[in-house]
Image (cartoon, rainbow, N blue to C red):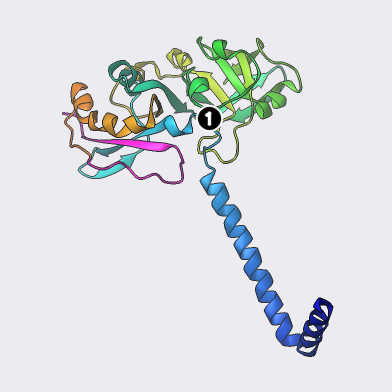
Amino acid sequence: MLKNYFKTAFRNLWRNKGYASINLLGLAIGLATFILISLFIKDELSYDRYNIKADRIFMMKENANWTGKWEICSMTSAPMGPALVRDYPEVENQVRIVPSFKATLKYRDKAFSEYPNFVDASIFDIFTLPLVYGQPANMLKEKNTVALSQTMSRKLFGNENPVGKIISYNGDINLKVDGVFEDVPHNSYIQFDVLISFETLTDESIGWKEEINNWGPHNNYTYLLLHDAVQAKQLEKQFPAFIQKQGRRIKIKKERLSVDKKRLKIIGYQHNKFV
């Protein structure tokens, strides 16, 4: 019986080749479109979910009024993260990420231009960055130390274990390699291959020393790790008092900033320009 159905269907298709071709082409395009959209949505929804602690990681953003116009700013001042950890028990940890201009990293006769990031050692506690070489307890705790992605490590050292070796940063600073971490997944909002210890920013040749304790410049991203994600709203309500404590006038932000492509949740606050 089933065989007869197939024969009948085939004869009808053969008899109406043009009509059948159009229908089959439409079906193929529809299925292909559905598959592509499904893959795109799956990829979008997977952003930053590789982080084991993703549900407790929040990115600081501010709605600042510097020139009479309110603007969303992703960067914050350097003292903010440590101050939040110190003053609010809801905050378990924080990490500051300072993006750098293109720099030359050199090991012996190999040199590459990269965009390093200066970070707190806590980045390995907050984000999921499995180590290939090195010990988590020793990563980026000291000045003039660096951690490399697997890709960057292979460029400079081949298949060697580079821990303890020295590379040059712009010919001015020698950096000791503390470890190598697995490449950051493509579906991560933050991408990096070179992580330099935050303490290295105190080097005079970098010109950042004065900004480390300055609430004025906004040159780094700040990520918070909360003890519990539900504490985010409670913490955000305390931001006006927190900013006032630092000497700024503040207008309370009544709603949380919306989450965009970044899957890490966002905590926002508002302030006016300096008094």
Q: Residues within 10 Å of mark 1 (few under 14, many from 20)?
A: few
Residue at figure coordinates x 32%, y 42% from the top left: 257
Q: In the visual, does 188 lie left or right of 253?
A: right
Q: Taking the image as drawn, is residue 213 in sight?
A: yes
Q: Position of residue 32 (x, y in %)?
A: 65, 64
In this view of the protein, which residue sits in the foreground, 35 or 70? 35
Q: Secondary structure at mark 1?
A: loop
Which residues are the magenta region?
254-275
Q: Which residue is mark 1?
A: 52
Q: Quadrant of residue 136?
A: top right
In this view of the protein, which residue sits in the foreground, 64 or 240? 240
Taking the magenta stretch, the answer to whether it contains residue 98 is: no
Q: Quadrant of residue 19?
A: bottom right
Q: In what quadrant of the picture does the N terminus appear?
A: bottom right
Q: In the visual, does 68 lie left or right of 166?
A: left
Residue at figure coordinates x 53%, y 30% from the top left: 52
Q: In what quadrant of the picture does the C terminus appear?
A: top left
Residue at figure coordinates x 22%, y 22% from the top left: 246
Q: Position of residue 4 (x, y in %)?
A: 83, 82
Q: Is residue 154 above or below residue 1?
A: above
